[in-house]
Image (cartoon, rainbow, N blue to C red):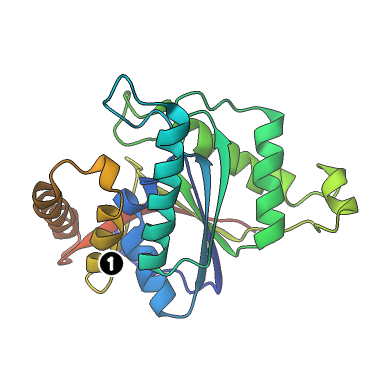
Amino acid sequence: MNIVDPPGSSSIMAIAAHPDDIEGWCAGTLACAIDRGATVRLLLVTSGDKGSSDPAAQPASVATRREEEARCAGRVLGLADIAFLRHPDGEVEPTPALRGQVVEWIRRWRPDTVFTHDPEHPDPPYISHRDHRTVGRVTLDAIYPSARDPLSFPDQLRAGLAPHIVRHVWLFASTQADAYVDISAGFERKLAARLEHTSQTPDPDALRSGWRQRSKTLGAAAGLPLAEAFTILHLD
């Protein structure tokens, strides 16, 4: 078990499956990194178009609302940019086309550090959302070796997007997590960002108390007041 500081990288990219994913697992750490001068950008693979309990809801309308909620949450956190790939919620597949899209945004934004879902040891185990597992796997495959190699997706090079090497990967929602970040300074922004996802928040008071307790419980394992936990990969 290691207590670590938020990334010192100047450029950070989070790649997530759904509009409210980063708030659950890494927004406190990202908020702290932003306070330390990092530029953080978010790539969302889906727009959460299945995220409604109303059987009469139209997926396109759900997606539009959830994208706007993500933009509002991003402003609360201080994100520099958000991009949407708009793959169908619940139907993300590990295709070469999706890998190419992720490579394109990595080459465009050129992050030192990437945050994404742990595809190999997902939390919760066995019943982790398949989009989470798929996005994590595609992201890792995009980082190594595709984004690095000039002969991968050469059309992007012709369009002016040079190869790029990501140095660090922080995997969230990981049952193997052993690196803990004190998010005391970023917790309120994490919570405020999550509450911007109003379509996913039937009981804001219960969410506030539940999320604070969850962060306390996670922090207690590392002797921290409030924490998020990660599996960290360093790529050479």
Q: Does 120 sit above or below residue 11?
A: above
The residue that mark 1 highlights is 189
Q: Position of residue 120 (x, y in %)?
A: 45, 34
Is residue 167 toward the left or the right of residue 182 in the image?
right
Q: Which residue is pictured at 18% across the width and 66% down the height?
A: 224
Give the side of residue 44 with respect to residue 24, left or right. Answer: right
Does 91 sit left or right of 154 as displayed?
Answer: left
Q: Residue furthest top?
A: 55
Give x and y (percent) for residue 59: 44, 28
The residue under label 1 is which amino acid type? Arg
Q: Is residue 161 left or right of residue 208?
A: right
The quarter of the rendered structure image containing the N terminus is bottom left
Residue at 70%, 58% (x, y): give it.
108
Judging depth in this view, the residue of 210 and 1 nearest the camera is 210
| Secondary structure under the numbered disc 1 in the rendered image | helix
Instruction: Report if residue 48 is visible in the image.
Output: no
Residue 150 percent coordinates (x, y): 84, 50
In which quadrant will I find the C terminus? bottom right
Task: Count how many numbered circles sit on residues in the image.
Answer: 1
Query: Does residue 112 appear anywhere in the picture?
Result: yes
Farthest residue, direction right: 158
Residue in the foreground of this view, choosing between 129 and 124: 129
Q: Residue at x 87, y 45 (%)?
A: 154
